[in-house]
Amino acid sequence: MQGSYDYRAVVLSFLIAWFAAFVAIQLVGRVRGATTRQATTWIWAGGIAFGLGIWSMHFMGMLAFRLPVPMLYDVHMTALSVLPAVLSSVLALYVAGRLRRSFAQLLLSAMFMGLGICAMHYLGMNAITFTPSETYSPFWVVASVVVAIAVSLVALHLLTRFSWVESEPRFGVQIAASALMALGVCGMHYTGMAALQVGPDTFCLTRAGAVPGEQLSLVIVSIALLYLAAITIGSQRDLHASEQRFRALVDGAPNAMVIFGPDERISLANVEAERMLGYGRGGLVGKSVDELLPERVVPRDPEARERFLMVPRQIQLGGGRDLHCRRRDGVEIPIAVGLSPLTVLGRRVVIASIMDLTERKEAQARIERLAYFDALTGLPNRSSFENRLAEMLGESGGDGFGLIFADLDGFKEINDSLGHSAGDRVLTQIAHRLREGVGERGEVFRFGGDEFIILLPDGSPTRDAGIAEELIRRIAVPIWMESKQLGVTLSLGSVRHPEHGREMDGLVKRADIALYQAKSAGKNVHLCFRADMEESVTRRFTLLNDLRSAQELGQLALLYQPIIELRTRRIIGAEALVYWNHPQHGRITPATFIPVAEEHGLIESLGEWVLEEAVRQSAGWRARGLPPLRLAVNVSCAQFRDANRLRNAVDRVLRRHGYPADGLELEITERQIMRDPESSIATMKALSELGVAMSLDDFGTGYSSLGHLRDFPLRKLKIDQSFTEQIDRDAPGRAIVRAVVELGRNLGMQVVAEGVEREAQMGPLLASECAQAQGFLFGAPMPAAEFERRLLRPMTV
Ligand code: C2E
Ligand code: MG
Ligand code: MG
């Protein structure tokens, strides 16, 4: 007896299998995204659903199978047959829910599952008691087992792989996959049915508990469908709830977060991310990662791209590395990103937690500016200079480079007299001028205080000198400050790499030496380093050391140079000049060591010693009845600045030796007095009160204005040697001397011509009515004993 099929029921059985497979696929996703405990719940719930699905499909299939006699099912056996279906489905979901599984595991699971389905099928068949007993074709039984295992393998493969590799489980793919699985399950069933062999007059015995197949199948199918529907709704609701919770969690996070999957599209972004990137609510969802990341950031190669974006474990990007992200308005902002891979609700995603580094970078830049730039002038500072120089030294070859050390002349006086804020303004102006002057040809650094360094890449000594000259010119342009004109000058010393050194220290030191020489040479000048400069500086240095003890060791001595009345050539005075009898270097002139003493604070005590010694000497001469002289003693501006100390020293010395104040004259050079005219006037007044006369030394070299000259309580002007030198040879020299004499007369001051060496100078000097003179013609500076002998001779020279 052969059965026939009711094809509508066949289709229905297929639909039931399809639905069950679809639900199973949905649930695998839930298993993946769940915690262990939740996963167990979902594996069982899903296993029962799929098992029930297969089971009910089986009975639907049975319903489709029509025998001429009604089929009766044993209820217990029927109920028992659900077990293998459910257990094998649980196994399937368990295997599929695990992310990493090997093919061997998959095959083994497929065999279990296949056997489970077969067990279900044949137990279900056994629930029908055919009389006489049915037989099974061995071929079709084996075929049905093979089909069951094959179906299970495909199903497991689809469950573990197909839908879940994609970030978005695509509905179409799910439908197709579940249809394939359903076809397999049906295939197994109908292969199994083909194995059934029943005789033509077979009938079903009514046993206790046996129910008609139609009724039972309908009940089973209904239960299965209800369960499937319930679990689908339950899972969807749970899905929704967990999604809500997840969204709330992400949204509440204080830092910007976006979530994207392997398709590189953003599926979720929190409020902070939208704010940071300039999007409205929900505006980021669906955007490609490419819209946020500049092209240079993400690799082009698809594999590298996948590795970069779909990180396998948590990593941090940015921070140290320059990572940027693009805002909606196109502006790129520096960011740091933490990427964490995660399976959320069954999807492989990456959570990007983004930190905006704009403020941090700005703060960093500010700190860097402070570290490498001078706050006052805005020029790069000493550290920058050192870095840059190290860099230039590292670049071998090329034409070498120039380094200029520049220092303002007399800046300390500006600071002292006008205050620090004026000093700051002057420095700012100077910095500006230097930068403009150097332009593209090099870089200007503030080395500290009023010192600047200029680095000139490539070039030549001639070009360096040209630039230095230009800077001198630019700086010399008067600076206007509170409607006052300030004359500032610049001294520069330069070196070239590699001629003058290959190391940083050597180069800077030699540029400094050249600068020092420029200062000594009268300032406002540029000098390029020469080897002999180093010697002179070293000498100067040892000189300083020796000078500290020179006074105590009695190495200082005074020489006296006669000052004469021109008309009569009578000695009317003497200038005391200090000399240093150095044990090794012999006699050292004051022009060499006085500036060193001034610079290193030795001049006050030295000056007081000179004053004491000179007055003692002159008082001695007077006491021995020698003609009274007016004695001239040089004082330095350092002594002049401390009016009280100088006044007291003078007063003390005069009293101690009972020397008349009007027999003493203090000489101060014009250049020194002009550094601070106001306080000089005060000191001069204090000294004049004692009755001591003041004379202005080296007149004509210090640019004093006539206005000032009138205010100084001076008795004498000493015309500098540079004017008297050529007086017999050139007319302008004569005119100047005459003008000075005239000026002196008008201001009530005596005029002395310095440095008279030749008889020939006498005529023009007398013609200009200059009253006094001093010079080698009348006598070079000489020791006291010799001067005394000169005094004792007839009073002329
Ligand atoms: P000064 O006060 O102008 O002194 C005159 C300088 O001219 C002296 O140089 C003297 O030797 C030099 N001299 C005199 N007649 C002639 C001449 O006919 N031809 C030439 N070529 N030179 C002549 P010296 O002794 O080397 O002194 C240089 C400067 O040192 C002085 O210039 C003075 O400013 C300073 N000085 C000397 N002694 C002292 C001192 O005790 N204290 C201070 N503060 N400065 C001093
Ligand atoms: Mg003098
Ligand atoms: Mg002089």
Image: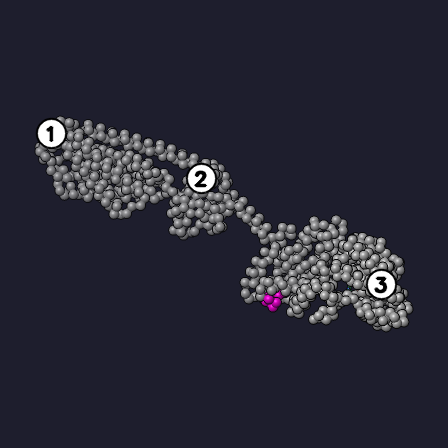
3 or 2: mark nearer the eye? 3
Q: Residues within 10 Å of mark 1 (few under 14, many from 20)?
A: some
Residue type at tag 2? Ala
Contact (Cβ within 8 Å) of mark 3 with mark 2: no
Rendered image quadrant of residue 116:
top left
Rendered image quadrant of residue 27:
top left
Question: According to the image, label 2 marks what residue?
Answer: 269
- Secondary structure of the residue carrying numbered label 2: strand
Q: In what quadrant of the picture does the C terminus appear?
A: bottom right
Distance (Cα) linking label 1 and label 3: 162 Å
Q: Is residue 497 magenta?
A: yes
Contact (Cβ within 8 Å) of mark 2 with mark 1: no
Among the two numbered marks 2 and 1 on one chain, the one whose residue lies closer to the N terminus: 1
Question: According to the image, label 3 marks what residue?
Answer: 619
Residue 321 in picture, x, y percent from top left: 48, 51
Question: According to the image, label 1 marks what residue?
Answer: 205
